[in-house]
């Protein structure tokens, strides 16, 4: 239970290395989604997986910008 509480606190109040790693992840997911949309015309399950990851990453990105 303490492990989950610790993770939740890191997500709720991001700083340091966690935030830098997340911003790199966000950039990679965004670039990957754009490349996949441009290069692969037929929709696959990978498209939808990247869409969901990009949506979650964008949501958390906006959250970190607001609290910082």
Image (cartoon, grey):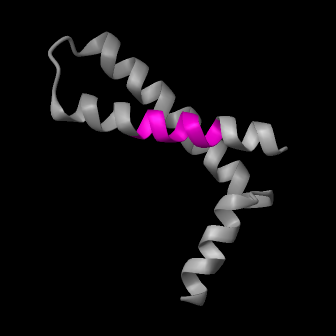
The x and y percentages for residue 15 are 79, 57
Q: Is residue 60 magenta?
A: yes
Res 10 → quadrant: bottom right
Main secondary structure along the magenta-highlighted residues: helix
- Is 60 on the left-hand or right-hand side of 67? left
Whether residue 36 sits left or right of residue 43 in the image: it is right
Left or right of 31, for residue 37: left
As drawn, which residue projects farthest toward the right? 68
Instruction: Tell whether position 44 is magenta.
Output: no
Vertical relation: 63 (above or below) 33: below
Q: How far across and down, in percent of the image, does residue 56 sit? A: 48, 41
Q: Nearer the viewer, residue 27 or 64?
A: 64
Question: Residue sitting at 17 percent across and 20 percent down?
Answer: 43
Q: Give the residue at x 68% y 41%.
A: 63
On screen, residue 51 versus residue 48, left or right, reads right
- Image quadrant in which you'd find residue 53: top left
Q: Residue 3: x, y in percent?
A: 57, 84
The total number of labels drawn is 0
Q: Quadrant of the C terminus?
A: top right
The residue range painted magenta reads: 53-61
Where 20 sits versus 48, above or below? below
Q: Which residue is depicted at the point 39% across and 25% down?
A: 33
* Residue sitting at x 49%, y 28%: 30
Residue toward you, 38 or 65 = 65
Q: Quadrant of residue 62?
A: top right
Q: Where 23 falls versus 7 (above or below)?
A: above
Give percent across and percent down for residue 46. 23, 34
């Amino acid at each position: 239970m303490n492990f989950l509480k610790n993770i939740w606190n890191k997500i709720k109040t991001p700083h340091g290395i966690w935030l830098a790693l997340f911003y790199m992840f966000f950039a990679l997911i965004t670039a990957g989604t754009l490349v996949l949309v441009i290069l692969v015309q037929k929709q696959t399950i990978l498209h939808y997986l990247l869409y969901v990851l990009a949506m979650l990453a964008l949501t958390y990105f906006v959250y970190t910008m607001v609290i910082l």
